Image: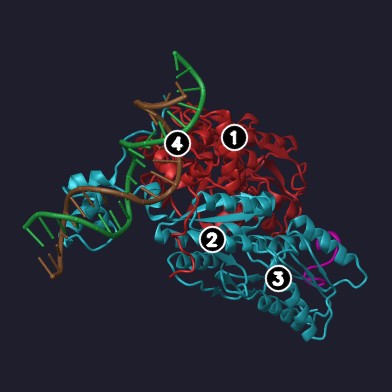
Chain colours: A red, B cyan, C green, D brown
Amino acid sequence: MSTYDRRVKRLTISDIAERAGVSIGAVSFALNGRPGVSEATRSRILSIAAEMGWRPNAAARGLSESRAHTVGLVIARSADTLGVEPFFMKFIAGLESELALTRTALLLQVVPDHPRSIEAICDWWAERRVDGLIVMDLWADDARLPLLESMRIPAVLVGRPRPDGGMPAVWSDDAAAVTEAVDFLVGLGHQRIARVAGLPALEHTQVRTAAFHAAMARHGLAPVAVVDTDYTWAAGAEATRALLAAADRPTAITFDNDVMATAGVSVARQLGVGVPHELSIIAGDDSQLCEMVFPTLTALSRDVQAYGAHTARTLLRLLNGGAPQSFQDATARLVPRESTAPC
Amino acid sequence: MSTYDRRVKRLTISDIAERAGVSIGAVSFALNGRPGVSEATRSRILSIAAEMGWRPNAAARGLSESRAHTVGLVIARSADTLGVEPFFMKFIAGLESELALTRTALLLQVVPDHPRSIEAICDWWAERRVDGLIVMDLWADDARLPLLESMRIPAVLVGRPRPDGGMPAVWSDDAAAVTEAVDFLVGLGHQRIARVAGLPALEHTQVRTAAFHAAMARHGLAPVAVVDTDYTWAAGAEATRALLAAADRPTAITFDNDVMATAGVSVARQLGVGVPHELSIIAGDDSQLCEMVFPTLTALSRDVQAYGAHTARTLLRLLNGGAPQSFQDATARLVPRESTAPC
DNA sequence: ACGTGGGGACCGTGTACTGAG
DNA sequence: CCTCAGTACACGGTCCCCACG
């Protein structure tokens, strides 16, 4: 016999019905705000339910409604890189602030790679554990999208909308943000600018890289280099080392996240390259980290929590029968700090 | 009419039964490995189920078994501090590596304070969304514990076991780790040592502070100061500034996490105090962050993912009817880096 | 005819009980 | 009499149909 007996009698709707002297159907109607009960009965039932602390059993409700009142988020990254990226926790907090309003739960799965992410999605869907999904870290040619479409799984994409518009997306104009960073550096007199990019398979990396080339070209400049990485500190350090060792050393580098920008500062210091006077640095994500290093980092900043909240709202609208409707969030804005200076 | 029709016909157990030419009872027995079906029938049913990609409906199973196959994790911290602490994501990844083995899902909730954490727990339990809980950030006098006991909610504590032993706990010897740090500093010749602690309401902060006093006393030393904080970078910076401005400035400071230690390095530099030659610094958590700053931080390091995995395993054992059995994880070990030097 | 509330089918699984070979 | 499979009901809600005043 276990310490915890699963078979303890728990409060059900019939307890409420009995206590109120009505049928369970009446209780159900009263609680869901449907017509069919008088206002007096409804309020009596509601106060009894509240008093007894009754809440509908999620499994029973889910079975009856064919709705789990739960959405899923699968994150496909190694735990190491996840940990240092403040982005995810902030995003999740934003998601939940919105989900809580409709009593929708969030199921989370952290898996190391894409195949296992697909596996997790299929499992959740087959078991009807989730009503819909939030899909992050979109690849340029993402195997999950055809899967989601063919299985008709409601989902919101965190990233650019697809041309066909079948799924809603929540996104911000990465290209404009990158352009602002380039314009800012050129305005300071920089001509030799390099970009340390994130995972090349990710769509937004490609968008940003294209925008970087375009912005440079508009100023009649050629990029010193664009280096692909995996977002880690080590990769950022190595990229910086290579860039600073080359003959045509850049006078400014933009990094695709804050972690790598920090690595860049660190490497520059080791090599005796002064930041910002000999090298300007811009971080592609903003977080407390950017204010924790010396010099503090000029960064592209956005409200990540709001981003998460908008994502949740977009998914909920879809689940409630709304047509797929994408949402463009605010563009990241440049926050100048100490790591950038005139050239 | 919505794009997504919730009423699409989905595979159920009766589809499998029909296809196999048996009753649904036989299918259920076959899939759950119970006696009552012949081996030939069982394997035939299993292969048909696998071929059709059938998975039991979680709501139906949960309703029938009175078990959600889901556990909950409530994190009560502001999104800001959560973001910079790599600890949580690593811990979650560790939890899930273990939960996935038994197909148990993880429900996550991030709330800003304790009362709302209690609210979330009550909601989940009343709705039977979870079978058990993982309780982190224990307070010395934690209002959640009596609640969990009175409602008989299975839970595992991440922290020291309670004297009564009613709930299993997963913990590591914080006192020993702090002692090792003090011994290390004293071994380097330090006499004036200060401690920048975390949230004073948290139990493990109190344990560490007590251990700090004891270890110092054993060496015949009096602490320069023990400063309570809220774990944020700003608090760490302020504490460091105060300590370094005082007449009896410490020659070494231990910080309760990596973020504040980073702040300490930053403030020391601003004040022209050389690290490590004039000031040694030890970080109480280890992460990539400790290797991202200059000088790199000597830290108390542990395998946080394994910690999460052990926690999940302990909870699952309890849920499967095992007696509450606590688990002492490995003690954090000191990893010397560049931020500590002889005095 | 209309507002109100009772009775019961149904959602998909798990699992006693029952009965046939 | 023992093995295997079929039937029936429980789990706790939602929601439709219909009786009653």
Residue to which mark 3 is pinned: B338
Amino acid at circle 3: Glu
Relative side of A285 to B214, left or right: left
Amino acid at circle 2: Ile
Amino acid at circle 4: Gly
Residue to which mark 4 is pinned: A25
- Marks 3 and 4: same chain? no
Residue B269 lies in the magenta stretch: yes
- Of circles 4 and 2, which is in front? 4
**The N terminus of chain A: image quadrant:** bottom left
Amino acid at circle 1: Ser
Dot 1 falls on a residue whose secondary structure is helix
Residue to which mark 1 is pinned: A43
Query: Residue A214, position in %: x, y?
Result: 58, 32
Q: From mark 3 to mark 2, how far is it between C-alphas? A: 46 Å
- Marks 4 and 2: same chain? no
**The C terminus of chain A: image quadrant:** top right
Relative side of A124 to B295, left or right: left
